[in-house]
Image (tube, rainbow, N blue to C red):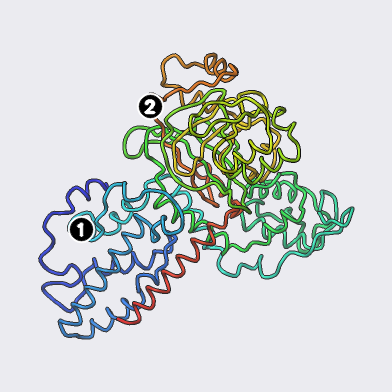
């Protein structure tokens, strides 16, 4: 629907104002009422109604109906048009330019959207409600998040189950605190009420005993509900309430609602459907998904592969950046060219202390000018040459190679790529930010099968052979594939499924929230000056 509206948006506009009845200039049209209702409902999309001065517009309209000069009606019409245009623009493209907060997504390259022309066309044809629906992101995830947003909004700012925090956990061994199945806990009733409100525990008297006979010990069905809660919050689902689980249980619905709103904002400027086949990595979730999009504007999204990943360290300069690029080639049995920053900060100091590490790990020196390998081990002179940029260090293919046996390359200015790793035990951790910025994938064979499934001659046996050859080889992709590195701390993994929340490990939610609040404050100041 959106493309049809955009294709005709440049047609002639209505000659008179759409907001007042031409036969009775003092009477607002149904479209004016629809526009105000649309702005009032902005919160259902995670937007802020006050950004569109909807209360001031409603007061002005009430005053106009008591009689007003044409100039006053004209000012109201201009303000309502501007507010509705901004609403449609915000709904379609988002309120923040992602590049202003360090995202390298490319919204300018997507389909042009003239919100003012789109509004005029909607008023002349399909109607505002239908136009707003078409302007919003046409992604199943966006619709799912909008539904769970309504659920969390319904919990209100001060739900009774969060009027006070849960009591501290019982003391455990070695000075720690945790609650295990079968143990007593003073706040079982409040815990049950909270889990019922969140949908992890069915509402029934058996959940935590009855009012006359409350539960005394932590047991089923509470333990099962806590497991469900843990799965939704990126925690190990052992049913044991430790400090991490308790901290997540203390988070109020208003904070979760804000996570949903921030994720919806990102979806407005995140290109999730660039091609029929794509790869996405959601940093806070530590998960990669390879998916296909069915034909047509409402094509179904089918996840073909899903796997754990390891991303850049949070508390450092090694955070994995967010951007979209195109995978163009694969390297089998790759060399690892040690980045200069890692060489300076880590490897050269290590080699000065322990020169044997050089041969143990299969390193070699490479002339920076010619690219030719240089024989010999580390010495004061060669290590100084590395620091001076005259030599580079690279790791030969083999079982110790930091990139494992395959590398998926999508050229970018940050030198980020996907690769395997010999440190496979790290994939079992719940939190997986251990890399220097590149993304390590848990199942590189499955990912290679997905990437090469349309490349003639590259079946699984040939892929395995190339990965285990021990000799570096580069394969150019016949069908380059978009790769999106994204960031969402709220996610609905399947239609009508539960919402999952993840920690804001890089602080990007905090930055986006601050930017949106500053924008709202600026709009409020501008509105007050009118």
- Which disc is residue 10 wearing? none
Q: Which residue is mark 1?
A: 117
Q: Is residue 258 above or below residue 422?
A: below
* Left or right of residue 337, residue 30 in this image: left
Q: Is residue 223 above or below residue 79?
A: above
Dot 1: within a 10 Å radius of its alpha carbon, few (fewer than 14), some, or many (20 or more) residues? some
Q: Nearer the viewer, residue 88 or 439?
A: 439
Q: Is residue 239 above or below residue 95?
A: above
Q: Nearer the viewer, residue 333 or 282?
A: 333
Tell me which residue sits at (58%, 16%) in the image.
Answer: 469
**Helix, strand or loop at disc 2?**
strand
**Helix, strand or loop at disc 1?**
helix
Q: Nearer the viewer, residue 249 or 322?
A: 322
Q: Which residue is mark 2?
A: 479
* Left or right of residue 380, residue 523 in this image: left
Pointer 1 or 2: first along the chain = 1
Q: Is residue 360 above or below residue 121?
A: above
């Amino acid at each position: 629907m959106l493309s049809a509206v955009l294709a005709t948006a440049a047609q002639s506009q209505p000659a008179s104002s759409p907001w007042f009845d031409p036969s009775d200039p003092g009477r607002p049209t149904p479209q004016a009422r629809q526009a105000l209702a649309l702005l009032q409902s902005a919160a259902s999309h995670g937007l802020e109604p006050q950004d569109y001065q909807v209360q001031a517009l409603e007061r002005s309209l009430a005053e106009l109906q008591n009689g007003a000069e044409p100039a006053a009606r004209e000012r109201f019409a201009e303000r309502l048009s501007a507010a509705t245009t901004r609403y449609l623009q915000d709904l379609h493209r988002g309120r923040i330019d992602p590049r202003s907060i360090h995202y390298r997504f490319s919204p300018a390259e997507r389909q042009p959207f003239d919100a003012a022309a789109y509004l005029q066309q909607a008023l002349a044809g399909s109607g505002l409600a239908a136009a707003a629906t078409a302007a919003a992101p046409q992604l199943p995830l966006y619709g799912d998040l909008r539904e769970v947003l309504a659920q969390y909004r319904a919990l209100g700012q001060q739900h009774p189950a969060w009027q006070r925090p849960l009591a501290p956990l019982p003391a455990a061994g070695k000075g720690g605190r945790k609650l295990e199945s079968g143990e007593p806990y003073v706040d079982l009733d409040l815990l049950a009420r909270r889990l019922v409100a969140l949908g992890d525990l069915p509402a029934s008297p058996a959940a935590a005993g009855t009012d006359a006979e409350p539960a005394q010990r932590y047991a089923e069905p509470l333990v099962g509900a806590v497991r469900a809660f843990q799965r939704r919050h990126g925690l190990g689902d052992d049913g044991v309430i430790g400090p991490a689980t308790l901290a997540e249980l203390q988070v109020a619905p208003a904070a979760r609602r804000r996570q949903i709103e921030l994720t919806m904002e990102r979806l407005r400027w995140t290109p999730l459907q660039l091609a029929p086949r794509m790869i996405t990595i959601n940093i806070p979730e530590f998960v990669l998904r390879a998916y296909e999009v069915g034909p047509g504007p409402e094509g179904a999204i089918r996840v073909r592969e899903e796997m754990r990943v390891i991303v850049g360290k949070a508390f450092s300069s090694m955070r994995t950046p967010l951007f979209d690029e195109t995978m163009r080639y694969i390297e089998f049995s790759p060399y690892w060219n040690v980045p200069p920053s890692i060489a300076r900060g880590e490897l050269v100091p290590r080699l000065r202390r322990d020169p044997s590490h050089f041969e143990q790990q299969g390193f070699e020196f490479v002339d920076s000018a010619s690219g030719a390998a240089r024989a010999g081990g580390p010495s004061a002179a060669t290590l100084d040459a590395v620091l001076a940029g005259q030599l580079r260090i690279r790791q030969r293919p083999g079982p110790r190679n930091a990139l494992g046996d395959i590398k998926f390359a999508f050229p970018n200015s940050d030198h980020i790529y996907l690769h395997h790793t010999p440190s496979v035990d790290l994939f079992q951790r719940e939190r997986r930010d251990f890399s220097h910025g590149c993304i390590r994938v848990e199942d590189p064979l499955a990912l290679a099968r997905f990437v090469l499934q349309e490349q003639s001659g590259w079946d699984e046996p040939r892929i395995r052979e190339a990965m285990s050859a021990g000799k570096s080889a580069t394969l150019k992709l016949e069908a380059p594939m978009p790769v999106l590195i994204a960031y969402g701390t709220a996610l609905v993994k399947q239609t009508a499924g539960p919402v999952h929340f993840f920690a804001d490990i890089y602080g990007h939610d905090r930055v986006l929230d601050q930017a949106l609040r500053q924008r709202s404050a600026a709009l409020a100041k501008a509105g007050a000056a009118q």
